[in-house]
Amino acid sequence: MLVDNIRDRYQAAGHDHLLTFWSTLPDSERESLSHQLENLDIDRVNRIYKKAIASEKEAADPEPIEPLPVGACESVVNDPANEKRWCSEGLEAIARGEVGVLLMAGGQGTRLGSSAPKGCYDIGLPSHKSLFQYQAERIARLQVVAEKECNKSAGSVVIPWYVMTSGPTRRETEAYFAKNNFFGLSSKNVVFFEQGTLPCLTAEGKIMLESTSRVAVAPDGNGGLYAATRAPLSKSNSSTVLSDLTDRGVLYVHAYCVDNCLVKVADPVFLGYCISKQADCAAKVVPKTSPSENKPNFVTPRLESSLSTPPTSPTTSTRRAISNPVESFEDDLAFHIARKKIPTIDLETGKAVKPTKPNGMKLELFVFDVFPFTKRFAVLEVARNEEFSPLKNAPGTGADDPETSRRDLLSQHKRFLERAGAQVKDGVEIELSPRVSYAGEGLEFVKGKTFTKSGYVENPEELDALL
Ligand code: UTP
């Protein structure tokens, strides 16, 4: 019988406790549990667990940090001389249709505590636009900027948007985009795909049950994107992200995280920088606010700068970087262990357990784990206040929360107006639609004006009402 085969396999691997409640389950639940167990590569899970534990021990005694290779790091903050040139190069690549963006939106946003996918979150802007909408409108605006800069006809430039979701976020994310008519983008240029999951484990490496008939699983980290780009887009569509990139002739991919309200999606300056460096892979970085700033350092033992990357690091990779160095990815890399509160089942009683402290672990790869595998790596330092304000924590936390996101975005819009030569009275808050300006461009007409009223504008003409 099928279940006997499964039991033998799981017994040999040390996980036959997953069948503890088998004899009490109705047929439908037996079917779903056996389906889940059949599709799980249990030996791989054991391998990943062993490696993760060994690597965690090694990390307690890290290798000495080495500087970045000479010439691999530049800064638009300290040396803006090349910015214009990079921007033109980036816009040209966009206009040639060589640029795509890849959004990592498979996380569960547990710290924020919202039940909807994080990209749907309203950070309290006057427009009440969500993070997804901001990103979509920046893509739309940048397409127009590239068309104008490179004398292309209106509507001819496309930046395809690859949206990585996960089991917990896919359905709601797709429904949210459809309900909002893809925020004005063409749905054929928005490609959803799904990252993998891994079972949650106890501290001893035993797979946890979420209910008597379901294994507890979690997305495999934002580094799951590499494997996900090689997997079929859906059950009914055998194309993959990689095949779609090839079909469209995309050469450069800007990957970014969903929760940075300041993200310059497909940033032409960064793209131009990467192209000029002929980088396989690159990352933007901002200086740490303090040596102990609690942000993951993207740097590897062999690559260090005094900078920390946004954990929502805008990373640009060429397609080569996505496809080649990661073929042996899982063999060479260790998953990271995240100790979390994981709702589970008491194996003695079958009763649900809602833990109040971490009781298990999720195994995750990080997007930046591939950096040591790239042949030509580059880093660009950018200004934190222009590019990085992540939404991590619940309202009222005081750091990286909805209030700081709102504050940082509105301050940026004030700077856009001031840089264009306008004055904005103290206390006045003006929100500019990304369709008005992507990075401060196109506002020359406000020169000499003084804004005295707060408000939100969808078109440049509406600004006069705020004088
Ligand atoms: P975080 O590691 O900050 O996780 O993700 P999170 O899900 O947003 O929040 P917490 O830790 O549960 O509170 C950084 C970025 O990586 C994506 C997230 O969606 C976010 O854009 N991510 C994270 C994935 O795409 N997949 C994952 O498995 C994990």
Image (tube, rainbow, N blue to C red):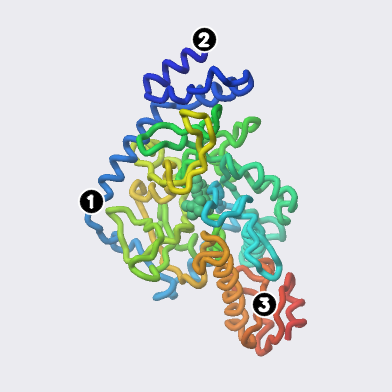
Instruction: Say what amino acid the circle numbered 3 marks.
Output: Ile
Mark 2: which secondary structure?
loop
Q: Tell me if the residue at label 3 has its CB under 8 Å from ligand 1.
A: no
Q: Classify mark 1: residues with Cα within 10 Å, few (<14), some (14-19) or many (20+).
A: few
Q: Which mark is residue 430?
A: 3
Which amino acid type corresponds to the residue marked 1 in the rendered image? Asp
Mark 1 and mark 3 lie on one chain; the one further toward the N terminus is: 1
At which x and y percent is residue 379? 39, 61
| Cα–Cα span, label 3 and label 2 | 67 Å
Label 1 – label 3 distance at C-alpha: 49 Å
Dot in front, 1 or 2: 2
In what element is the residue under mark 1? Answer: loop
Image point 53% across, 40% down: which residue?
A: 195
Residue position for label 2: 1
Q: Position of residue 286 (x, y in %)?
A: 42, 67
Residue hosting label 1: 61
Instruction: Identify the residue at horizontal 25%, vertical 58% (top origin).
Output: 65
Quadrant in the rendering for residue 436? bottom right
Estimate how packed mark 3 is, as few (under 14), some (14 to 19) or many (20 or more) residues with alpha carbons within 10 Å: many
Residue 319 visible within the image = no
Q: Report the residue that reaches farthest toward the top.
A: 1
Mark 2 nearby-residue class (10 Å; few <14, some 14–19, many ≥20): few
* Residue 389, x across and y down, in percent: 51, 66
Q: Do the residues labelled 3 and 2 touch (CB within 8 Å)?
A: no
Q: Is mark 2 within 8 Å of ligand 1?
A: no
Amino acid type, residue under disc 2 in the picture: Met
Q: Where is residue 140 in the image (x, y as percent from the top left)?
A: 67, 60
Q: Earlier in the sequence, mark 1 or mark 2?
A: 2
